[in-house]
Image: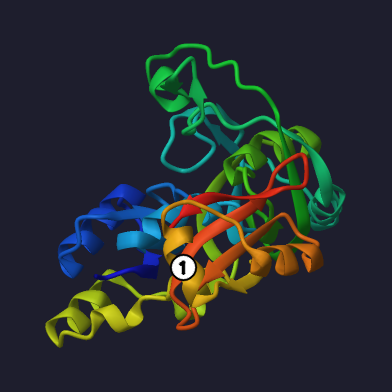
Amino acid sequence: MTAGVLVVDKPPGITSFDVVQAVGRILKERKCGHAGTLDPMATGVLPVCVGAATKIAGYLTEEEKEYEAGFAFGVATDTGDATGKPVEERPGATATEDAVAEALADMVGTFEQVPPAFSAVKVGGVRSYKLARKGMEVPLAARRVTVREARLLSFGPDRFRVFLSVSKGFYVRSLPRDLGERLGVPLTVSELRRTRVGPFRASVAVTLETLRERAQGLDARSLLIPIVDALGRFPRWEVPAEATSQVRNGRLSGRWLVDRAATERGDFALLVTSQREPLAIVGRDPTGLWKIVRGI
């Protein structure tokens, strides 16, 4: 059975779901899902989980992310990017390079960020972008996010480019609103490329065209990153052969577990067989006891 994570270099103009469908067709695999949505205009790293790897998608979305983004002065849109409708236009408006660099530097840290109205955040069970498209007010709660690095890559009189290293939940399309208010000038995201999701970097991402070519030679599956490697940040616990069937049935006990749990400082670990086959993800509950949180 095919299972693993394919790091796709998403092209512009299509949705993340379109990419997932394309991967499924090429690999002839019905179970596929992405780990972290990219807007249609955005390009770059989109991890696509294939087969049993769909079970770990939620853990991959928790990873840190890096972006290279371009911003244009003088116009603000309802979506925050170039695909939206202008809501404010001031041709020729700009800011100084020093002011932009200072504003970016001040962003580094942990703070509350309000997502853009056109986002996948649910409001009363409905995606906020669906409400926004109907012209409805979208009251979104602020979310705690972290910016680990934010720096200027290039600057011109009408636009600039930045590098961002951020936590889960950070919206680049919120920056035109937040930076624009600080700089006193309308801004919009003119380009956006994700260069990293956790361990997955753009340098190892493949295009859909490359995937199709490799599929013709029947070696496309060699591009899949094994589940144990995709979850490389998790401590790896080897389960004794006599306990593997027990773990597969959702039970967790035995002297081997006591010994491993006693030395583990983190809150999650990946259980594997002696052949590095993934079995389950275990987590520590509030009382300190370990339990299976996701079977693989």
Q: Which residue is at 48% across, 72% downward?
A: 242
- Give the x, y percent position of residue 285: 70, 43
Which residue is depicted at the point 72% across and 68% down?
A: 260
Q: Is residue 180 above or below residue 200?
A: above
Percent across and percent down for residue 130 are: 38, 23
Residue picked out by circle 1: 244
Query: Residue 230 at x, y = what percent?
Result: 51, 70
Q: Relative to 169, say whether 270 is above or below.
A: below
- Residue 83's quadrant in the figure? top left
The answer, for residue 158, to whether it is visible in the render is no
- Report the residue at 55% width, 58% height from top: 281
Position above or below: 184 against 209: above
Which type of secondary structure does the marked residue at label 1 adopt? Answer: helix
Q: Amino acid at mark 1?
A: Thr
Count residues near mark 1 (Cα–Cα under 10 Å), then give few for <14, some for 14-19, many for 20+: some
Q: Residue at the far left: name it.
A: 216
- Number of on-image labels: 1
For residue 113, side relative to residue 224 (left or right)? right
Position of residue 241 measured from the top left corner of the image (x, y, whole percent) = 48, 76
As drawn, is 281 to the left or to the right of 226?
A: right
Query: Which corner quadrant holds the N terminus?
Result: bottom left
